[in-house]
Amino acid sequence: MGFVGGDDQGDLGTQPTCSTTYTVGSLIGSYPSSCSGAASNNYSFVYVDGTVTVLTACSSFNGFLAPIGGANASPAVAGPGGSLLDPLRTFKLKSTIPFKFSAMCFGVPLTTGIHTLKAQKWSNGSPDGDEVIAVATDAATTGNQFRLTDSQWHFNFDTKLLGNGGQGTWFFEVTLFDGSKYNVWLAIRK
């Protein structure tokens, strides 16, 4: 029920205060919110906690750069990043696949944060084997395989480390610091 008799929030003795754990740039997800503290001789208050839900990220992914290209495949549906049955690109086993991408956040190049690149082989429509995970941070050192160089994030995926079992279709997924995910399907052949 709202105000009555022409009253408005100015008729309260004390205005309520509201808070949330969400801040600008928070990751995709849900954040609790609550209000309290309103006082009036004419009204009583019942507070119900709420939720701030962040559905979109600050990031704008610019796609995987050459030689990969494309972005945002789905495990089940073909898209610009290919599909399980129609990978975007094919690379030779015992080669190095250079992943390069860039992204924007609030209109500027994304050069900070912790990001991950996950790779997993798929067979018969399901993940097959352990995930290979690389993590990059803005504090990355020269020796890190996943690093920031000239406003682009780079990771060299060495297929020599996969052995002969590395042949097949692979799903690669980048998760940026804000929770947004971008992915591509690639084939690795002898």
Image (tube, grey):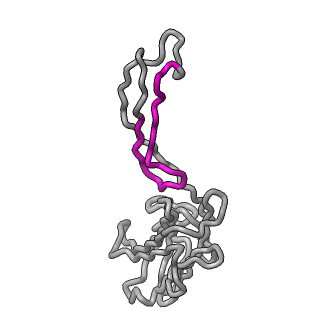
Q: Quadrant of residue 162?
A: bottom left
Is residue 190 in sight in this rendering? no
As drawn, 10 above or below 126: above
Residue toward you, 83 or 105: 105
In the depicted view, which residue is nearer to us: 7 or 60?
Answer: 7
Residue extending farthest to the left is: 129
Up the image or down, 46 lies above or below 117; here it is: above
- Front residue (pair 13, 136): 13
Residue 73 in the image, given as x and y percentages of width and height:
51, 63
Vertical arrangement, residue 167 with respect to residue 16, above or below: below
The answer, for residue 72, to whether it is visible in the render is yes
Q: Position of residue 158 (x, y in %)?
A: 48, 86
Question: Count the marks: how many?
Answer: 0
Percent coordinates x, y for residue 71 in the rendering = 57, 65
Residue in view at x 56 percent, y 75 percent:
89
Image quadrant occupied by the N terminus: top left
Query: Which region shows up in magenta?
Result: 11-35
Can you name the residue that lies furthest to the top here? 5
The answer to whether residue 110 is magenta is no
The residue nearer to you, when weighing 53 against 86, is 53
Identify the residue shown where x is 45% and y is 37%: 18
Q: Could you tell me which residue is drawn at 47 percent across and 23 percent down? A: 13
- Say which quarter of the image contains residue 64: bottom right
Image location of residue 187, percent across then percent down: 49, 77
